[in-house]
Image (tube, grey):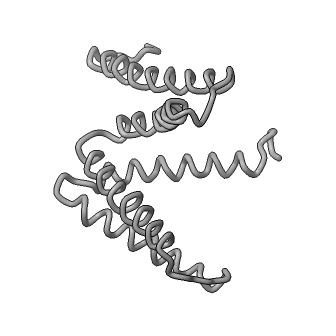
Amino acid sequence: GLGGFRLGDWLSVGCAVAYAGHILLTERFATKDNAVGLVSVQLVGVAVMSALCLPFVERKLEWTPPLVGAVLACGVLASAVAILVQTWGQARTSAVRAALIFALEPVFASAYSVAVGREVLGPKEWLGGALIVVGVFASELGTAVWDGWRARGRTPAA
């Protein structure tokens, strides 16, 4: 790949850029009064785009109790309710703070996995988790330091 990057690396970078764009657009368009409307538009958009893919895949559907449970859990709880709560919360904070909170997701996922005995963290996992936490703190403190410099009418480079 280009510069040691492989396809998966580029897909990860592209996904991160797209997610950052999503956070910024949500900050711009999510108000305290329209979270339900915004989430509805998002979910309908995903449904329409997903439906456009149907002619290109094999389809077989059997409505079984496990499938209905999975649709309710993933479609209602993990999508509609989770995105609604997320959008509601983001309408009440900045995009930067929301991004910092989202950056802690793998830390909480790892902590949960360790707590329930599903995973044992090795040195690489501890280092990765530490880098995430340090990055989050640096981002939060960096913003406060930068704002302090700007309030004094200068920048750190000046």
Task: Answer with the quarter of the image where residue 42 lies.
Answer: bottom left
For the C terminus, the image quarter is: top left
Task: Answer with the quarter of the image where residue 128 lies.
Answer: top right
The residue shown at (51%, 34%) is 116
The residue shown at (21%, 60%) is 34
Q: Nearer the viewer, residue 89 or 123?
A: 123
Q: Residue furthest left?
A: 33
Up the image or down, 16 lies above or below 37; here it is above
Task: Answer with the quarter of the image where residue 95 lies.
Answer: top left
Up the image or down, 22 lies above or below 134; here it is below
The residue shown at (48%, 34%) is 112
Where residue 12 appears, as percent x and y from the top left, is 64, 47
The residue shown at (49%, 50%) is 19
Q: Nearer the viewer, residue 137 or 77?
A: 77
Image side of residue 119 versus residue 72, left or right = right
Where residue 85 appears, as percent x and y from the top left, is 29, 51
Q: Residue furthest bottom?
A: 55
Image side of residue 9 versus residue 22, left or right = right
Where residue 133 appears, as percent x and y from the top left, is 49, 24
Where residue 113 appears, as percent x and y from the top left, is 54, 36
Total labels: the figure holds: 0
